[in-house]
Image (spheres, rainbow, N blue to C red):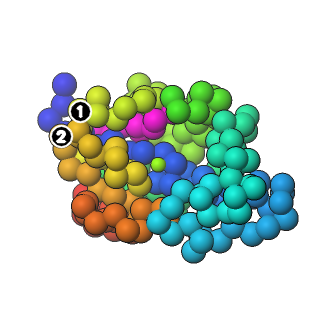
Amino acid sequence: MTNKKRLAVDMDEVIADSIARFQEWYGRDFQLELSRESLRGRPAADAVAPEHQAALREYPNAEGFFRDLPIIADSQEVLFELSKKYELFIATAAMEFPNSFVDKYNWLQQHFPFIHWRNFVFCGDKSILNADFLIDDNAYNFDGFHGEGLLFDAPHNAHETRYRRVHSWREVGEILL
Ligand SMILES: [Mg+2]
């Protein structure tokens, strides 16, 4: 046991840039650009023409979608510092996309080697989490969460106002370190 407070951190759009993969694959398949601005207040599939929406909805189910995703700026450095002060867990609702498991695991091992696999939580409903803080870009993951939710800024959550918003990992560090 430890007296440290417990911090849970989401993956997609918090430490892993999955929007970049949507942009990459949309360009590959349709030769069109998916701007971050067009994603404001809605999921990626809702930002494209109706005839392309089904394809975008399927992307996260496809093998390799979560492989080699870019890292969100400063997340490695700040989480390394936070890992000294907090009991740090990565909590991702991976069950939504079963093909993501191995890619997510490998990605964490490669880019966040200071986080032990015991602290990886691949889950479904995040209300099962028992932590003091949860950093997540999806406000619905704070429903039923008993700690404090910090909403990590992302285009799709632009209109969400119920939770404290953090815009960068530098800002997370200023709040939690
Ligand atoms: Mg997320």
Residue 22 position in % (x across, y down): 68, 55
Residue 165 position in % (x across, y down): 31, 65
**Nearest to N terminus: mark 1 or mark 2:** 1
Position of 134 with respect to 132 (left or right) is right
Magenta-tinted stretch: 84-94
The foreground one among 130 and 89 is 130
Q: Secondary structure at mark 2?
A: loop
The foreground one among 159 and 137 is 159
Say which mark, if any, is on residue 130. Answer: 1
Look at the image and tell me in which quarter the N terminus lies: top left
Residue 125 position in % (x across, y down): 37, 32
Position of 51 with respect to 172 (left or right) is right
Which three-letter amino acid code belongs to the residue tagged 2?
His
Which three-letter amino acid code belongs to the residue tagged 1?
Asn
Say which mark, if any, is on residue 146. Answer: 2
Say which mark, if any, is on residue 11. Answer: none
